[in-house]
Image (cartoon, rainbow, N blue to C red):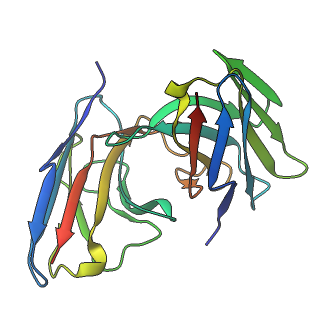
């Protein structure tokens, strides 16, 4: 069964802290995405990748880095976390790009104090 | 950047009635339009999608209409049940052939018994 697994599911850090969110998909999908979800804004794309070693910038990339180490693994890095980055983060994957609906992971709730 | 406008943001209907959610997009080259349902504490899940070569699609009590001339698409839920209560998101591909989806800001649907 197709799956996207995120870890951790919950994370609390302090302002200025260093956070890494992990995502693994076992669907042989080429595309992987990081979104953040905030009330009133829907789902906003942070970064995405279409293959190992590839990284593309989304709509709200400031303050975030990402790395795609393998076809399966995509990481989101917050090197100096700020309270404005408190949010619900979703990883997603799809076989192809914008003409296929991404499959979402379970989400990571991040609080930056 | 390009946006997808989704209305209404809050929708309350009586059980057994219909619910309609409307979205508009900016780029006439957009060619793929998925709809997601998100229940509390869960991830968004694809419920129906439509491509630009269609004007109407129906599945299991859901109807999607696409008006390319008006750059508008809509979701209609017939015979609503309490289990339909959730957040709904529309999305549109950024442009023809693009990898990226742009999401609306969501509609919180409540079906009242």
Place residue B39 in its image quadrant.
top left
- For the point 29% across and 40% down, the residue is A105
B104 is higher (above) or lower (below) than B65: below
Left or right, B24 with respect to B112, comes to right
At a point 20% along the width and 63% down the height, the residue shown is: A110
| Residue found at the far right of this picture | B69
Q: Position of residue A57 (x, y in %)?
A: 40, 68
- Residue lying at 60% horizontally and 55% vertically, measured from the top left: B104
Task: Judge from the rendering whether residue B4 lies leftward or rightward of residue B38; answer left or right.
Answer: right
On the rendered image, what quadrant is the C terminus of chain B found in? top right
- Indicate left or right for A112 with A41 as reference: left
In the rendered view, tell whether residue A8 sits above or below residue A56. above
Q: Nearer the viewer, residue A48 or A4?
A: A4
Quarter of the image holding residue B52?
Answer: top right
x, y percent for residue A27: 29, 28
Report x, y in % for residue B63: 73, 26
Please tell me which residue lies in front, A87 or B16. B16
Q: Residue at x 64, y 43 (%)?
A: B12
Above or below — where is B97 with respect to B25?
Answer: above
Residue A95 seen anywhere in this rendered image of the structure: yes
Position of the N terminus of chain B, as image quadrant, is: bottom right
In the image, residue B5 sits, relative to residue A18, either above or below, namely: above
Task: Report how many numbered discs are placed on residues in the image.
Answer: 0
Residue A99 visible from this viewpoint: no
Q: Which residue lies most toward the top here?
A: B60
Q: Position of residue B98 (x, y in %)?
A: 58, 52
């Amino acid at each position: 069964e197709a799956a996207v697994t995120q870890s951790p599911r919950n994370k609390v850090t302090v302002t200025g802290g260093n956070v890494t969110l992990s995502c693994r998909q076992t669907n042989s999908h080429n595309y992987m995405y990081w979104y953040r979800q905030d009330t009133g804004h829907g789902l906003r794309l942070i970064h995405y990748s279409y293959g190992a070693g590839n990284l593309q910038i989304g709509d709200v990339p400031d303050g975030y880095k990402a790395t795609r180490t393998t076809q399966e693994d995509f990481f989101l890095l917050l090197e100096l976390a700020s309270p404005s980055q408190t949010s619900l983060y979703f990883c997603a994957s799809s076989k192809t790009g914008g003409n296929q609906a991404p499959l979402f992971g379970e989400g990571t709730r991040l609080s930056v104090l | 950047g390009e946006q997808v406008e989704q209305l209404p943001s809050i929708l309350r209907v009586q059980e057994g009635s219909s619910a309609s959610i409307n979205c508009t997009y900016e780029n006439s080259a957009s060619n793929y339009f998925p709809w997601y349902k998100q229940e509390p504490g869960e991830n968004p899940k694809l419920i129906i999608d439509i491509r630009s070569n269609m004007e109407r699609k129906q599945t299991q009590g859901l109807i999607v209409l696409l008006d390319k001339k008006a750059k508008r698409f809509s979701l209609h839920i017939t015979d609503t049940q309490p289990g339909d209560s959730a957040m709904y998101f529309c999305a549109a591909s950024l442009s023809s052939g693009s990898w990226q989806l742009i999401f609306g800001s969501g509609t919180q649907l409540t079906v009242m018994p």
